[in-house]
Image: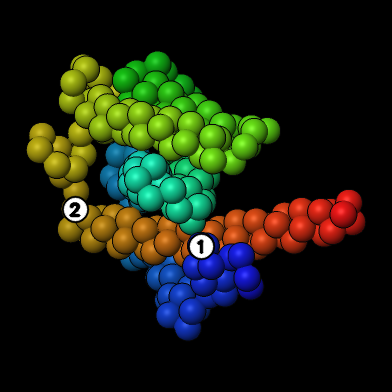
Amino acid sequence: MKGMEDLGRMSPTSFQRWFFLFTAVMLLIAIYMVFIWTPIERNMGVVQKIFYFHVASAWNAFFAFFIVAVFSILFLVTKKRVYELMAGVSAEIGVMFTAIVLTTGPIWARSAWNTWWTWEPRLTTTLILLFMYIGYIMIRNLEMEWQRKARLASVFGIISFINVPIVYMSIRWWESNLHPVVVGEGGGGLETAMLITLIFSVFTFTCLFFVLLQRGLQVEKLRLMVSRIKAKKQEQMIS
């Protein structure tokens, strides 16, 4: 449609449709691996299964906010509306994954630490991260000229990303007896089957992120197209 060239293609490509099916199959395999193939952890029991969704969601929340920062920079440099839309959709997905992290975390904590919540470094910085990106989304929904609003949101999105490495490093920088390092330097390690399932779950959730990003961007483009048509009709009626 004329006037929408700056937003790129409106409908999904054949690759995107096949990728959606691929992701759906991967999700089914991941569920099988988590609940059937992977052994039950000796000390924590079946509640440890939540670990695979918890870590995969945390990784994708970090990745989503990285995408927000990248496309915010691209928007500030090029002023292309599509980059601002991608950053906005990615922020919404990141908030969703962060909410999953902050939901599955207390369920796991109740079993492991005998408490639903504690103000330890990882949980506290993650909660702050959630509030920062809710603030970013609120800025994008302010009633003002879209270019000004997009510039303000882009700057806030870039600044907010500073908190992502702080969340990741929080249990290494500040002492936390409750939130142990599991993967990486100083980690306690995982059994082979658990590690394979964790990697597969993270990869599958990353595929899900790209599916949600594509679908969300399509919805945003359609919404923008409708608002432009509406504005044009109103101008014609006034004239």
Q: Residue at x 30, y 39 (%)?
A: 43
Say which quarter of the image contains residue 154: top left
Quick check: 105 left or right of 73? right
Of circles 1 and 2, the one toward us is 1
Q: Residue at x 81, y 54 (%)?
A: 235
In the rendered image, residue 164, in percent from the top left (x then y), is placed at: 31, 33
In the rendered image, residue 40, in percent from the top left (x then y), is placed at: 33, 52
Note whether 18 is above or below 24 in the view shown: below
Screen quadrant of the N terminus: bottom right
Q: Residue at x 23, y 25 (%)?
A: 171
Note whether 90 is above or below 112 in the view shown: below
Residue under pointer 1? 6
Label 1 sits on what residue type? Asp
Residue 214 in view: yes
Label 2 sits on what residue type? Glu
Quick check: 140 left or right of 175? right
In the rendered image, residue 41, in percent from the top left (x then y), is placed at: 30, 47
Relative to the observer, which residue lies in front, 3 or 65? 3
Q: Residue at x 70, y 57 (%)?
A: 228
Screen quadrant of the C terminus: bottom right
Q: Earlier in the sequence, mark 1 or mark 2?
A: 1
Relative to the observer, which residue lies in front, 142 or 12? 142
Residue farthest toward the left in the current orientation of the protein = 185
Residue under pointer 2? 191
Note whether 209 is above or below 60 in the view shown: below
Relative to the observer, which residue lies in front, 115 or 122? 122
Task: Give the number of marks.
Answer: 2
Say which quarter of the image contains residue 145: top right
Residue 106 in view: no
